[in-house]
Amino acid sequence: MKTRPPVMKAYAIPTKVRVTARGALACAVALALTACSAFGPSRNPPAMTMPASYNAVSTMNPPMVEAPPVPEWWTLYRSDALDALVKEGLANSPSLAAAQSTLKAAHEQLRGQIGQNVFPTVDVDVSPTRQRALGIPILPQETFLENVFTAQVEAKYTFDFFGASLLADRALGRQVLSQAYQLQATRRALAANIVLATIDSASLAEQIAATTQLVALGEQRAAQLKARYQQGSASHDDMLAAEEDAANTAATLPALRAQAESVMHAQAVLLGRNPDQAPQPLALDSLHMPDQVPVTVPSELLHQRPDILAAEAAVRASADEAGAAAAALYPSLTLAASYGRGGFDWSTFTSPAGAIWSVGATLTQPLFHGGALAARKRQYQASYEASVALYKQTVLAAFQNVADTLVSLDEDANTLTQTARAASSARYVDADTQARYRLGAMPFYATLTAGQQYQTAAVQYVRARAARLADTANLLDAMGDPVPSSAKHAQAAQHPQASMSP
C-alpha cells in the first residue's frame, strides 16, 4: 500500500500546496484500497467438490490412520543410514540449490518493485558542460563558446489512485509465494527420489544375489542332466530343456546388474555426488515399515500439498495482474519537483543568483494506445482463467495421486502376503528335499530343482517388499506438510506483500 512520501527538504512547499498534497494523498490511499476489490476477478480459488474418501481401503498393514502428515516422513523407516543420505541430498543437490537461488532472486525482484512503486524516486544530476553554439545571424559574432554548470536534486511520485501499482506488487508477491511453494515441492520430491532410489538399490542388490544363486543352480542342473544323458539315464529333450532354462536364467542377470548400476548412478547424482561415488546399497531389512501411515481427509489435503498451494497462489497472482491491467486504463497523477544550482561560470553557480528549482504535476489519462491496454487486460483475464483451470486440475490430480497410491498399497499388502507364503513354502520344500537327499531317499537333481524354486520365490518376495516400501514412501510424500500453526506464516500466506516488503 502506498504511503505518504517524505517531505523534500530541497525547497519549502507553500502551506496551501502542502494541504492540497495531503488531501490528494488521502484520496489516493482511499481509491487504492477500493481498487483492490473493484478491479479484476475474484482472488479466491474456485470451490472444489470434495470426495468422501480417496478409496475404500480393505486390508492395510500397517494401518492407515487419520492424522497430520510428518514433515520429515523418511524418518519413519527407522534407518539412520537412510536419514543421512536424505540429509546429504538436501544439503548438496545442485537442483535444489538452483531453486533456492531462483526464489531469492524473485524476493529481491519483489523488494525492488515495491520500493519503486511505494516510495518516491530521488535522483541527483550533476552536469558540467562546455559547448560551442551558433549565434544570432544579425550579430557580428557567429558562434559563442560557453560553459554551463548545473547540479540539482529531482524527486517524483505517482499517486496510485486506482491501485494499479498496488495490484501489480501484490501479484508479484503471490508469484514469489507460488515459487516458495514450488521450492518446497522440489525439496519433497528430492527427498522422495532419494528414498525410492535407496529402496530400489537395496532391492536390486538382493535380487542379484538371489538370481546369482539361481543361475548357479541352473548351471548345475544342466550339467547333471547332460551327464545323465551321456550315461543313458536322461532323455535328450530333458538335457536340452535344462540347458535352455539355465541360459534363460543367466540372461536375466546382466539386465539386473545394469539396472542396479543405473539406479546407483541416479542416487549419486541426487546426493550431489559423481556417478562413480554412489553409496553402497543398504540392506533391505534395515528399512522398516512405519507403524502407522498418516492419511489426511481430502479437505485438509488442499492446505498441505505444496503443488496445490502453489496453484492457489498462482490464481491469486493472476487475478491481481488482471486487476492491475484494468486499473491501468484510468488516470494517474505524478508530482515532480527539483532544486539545484546552475550558471555559466563557477561564480554564478555558487552565488544566490544560481539557485534553480521547479515544481509541477502531471495528470495522465490514457486515450489511445492502439488497443494495447485493452488487449493487455484481455490477456491477463485469459491468464486468470487458465490459472483457475490449472488449479482445478492440480487438485484433481492430487486426489488421484493419493487414491492410486492407496490402491497400490492395498494390493502391495496382498502381494506381499502371497509372495511371503510362496517363499516360505518353497524354503520348506527345499529344506525337506535336502534332508531326504542326505538320507538317500531323493536324487541330487531334485534338490537343484527345489533350490531353483526357492530362489525364484525369494526374488518375487524381495520385489514385493521393495514395492511396499516404495509405495509407502509415495503416500507419505503425497500427504504434503502439516498446516503450520504460526499466525505469522498464515498472515504471510494471505498478505505476501506485507511480509516481503523491505
Image (spheres, rainbow, N blue to C red):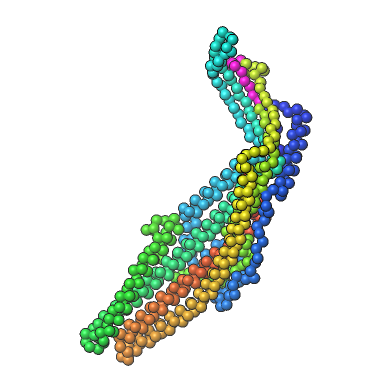
Please provide the residue range marked out in magenta. 339-347
Q: Is residue 492 above or below residue 50?
A: above
Residue at the spot 67% in from the left edge and 52% down from the top edge:
41
Q: Could one spot residue 252 in this view of the protein?
A: yes
Residue at the spot 64% in from the left edge and 64% down from the top edge:
300
Please identify the residue farthest to the left as the structure is shown. Answer: 230
Q: Nearer the viewer, residue 86 or 303?
A: 303
Quarter of the image where the N terminus is located: top right
* 154 on left or right of 463: right
Residue 373 drawn at (x, y percent) = 63, 43
**Residue 345 within the segment the image draws in magenta:** yes
**Residue 88 within the segment the image draws in magenta:** no
Residue 125 drawn at (x, y percent) = 59, 27
Q: Nearer the viewer, residue 464 or 20?
A: 20
Q: Nearer the viewer, residue 482 or 285?
A: 482
Q: Could one spot residue 170 in this view of the protein?
A: no
